[in-house]
Image (spheres, helix red, strand yellow):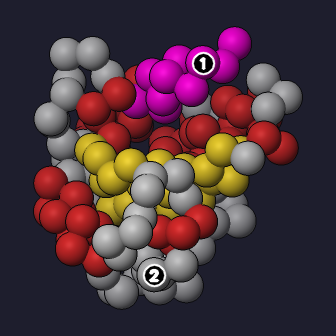
Amino acid sequence: MRSVLFVCTGNICRSPTAEGLLRHKLLDMKLLDEFHVDSAATHSYNIGDPPDPRTVSVARENGVSLDNLRARKVRSSDFHTFKSILAMDRNHLQILRALAPAEHEGEIRLFLDYCPGLEGQEVPDPYYGDMKDFYRVYSMIERGVEEFIKSAALP
């Protein structure tokens, strides 16, 4: 089974959007059963909380449900469970690499590294912005999810 964990600061904006979008697209492709998809936070600010209402609103407008998602923090077991751990920004990447055990064999990289022309770029945190920032981030994440699917050689 393929596995991917999306990571951002509080697990209420960027990473749940990526999780929800990938689940939605895999479900449409009838491939969801072949994947373990999850998201987590580097910080414990919002543990147990649902995604930010603005995140939920933008996802819902695009036909993606985030209703059952709740914020959680990255656990040491995640490094054994997930083959791909994808960080939304360099700070998350640095934290994840510091937490990863030496024997971790999966990839830990920036999420947008999957997007030609966006390698090394970050998905900005929309939390302190306005709705246009949430729409912009949704579009970036949608492109990243589509490129991730292509990289996994899925139809």
Q: Is residue 64 left or right of residue 18?
A: right
The kind of residue on which mark 2 rests is: Ser
- Residue 61 appears anywhere in the view: yes
Looking at the image, which is closer to me, 100 or 121?
A: 100
Q: In which quarter of the image is residue 23?
A: top right
Q: Residue at x 58, y 39 (%)?
A: 21
Q: Residue 4: where, in percent of width, then height?
A: 54, 50
**Residue 42 versus residue 99: which sits nearer the camera?**
99
Residue at image x 29%, y 47%?
Answer: 109
Quadrant of the image occupied by residue 110: top left
Residue highlighted by disc 1: 153
N-term mark: 2 or 1:
2
The x, y position of residue 71, in whole percent, is 51, 75
The answer to whether 87 appears left or right of 11 in the picture is: left
Q: Residue 23 carries which label?
A: none
Residue 12 vs 126, above or below: the answer is below
The answer to whether 127 appears left or right of 143 in the picture is left
Range drawn in magenta:
144-155
Q: Quadrant of residue 141?
A: top left
Residue marked by disc 2:
76
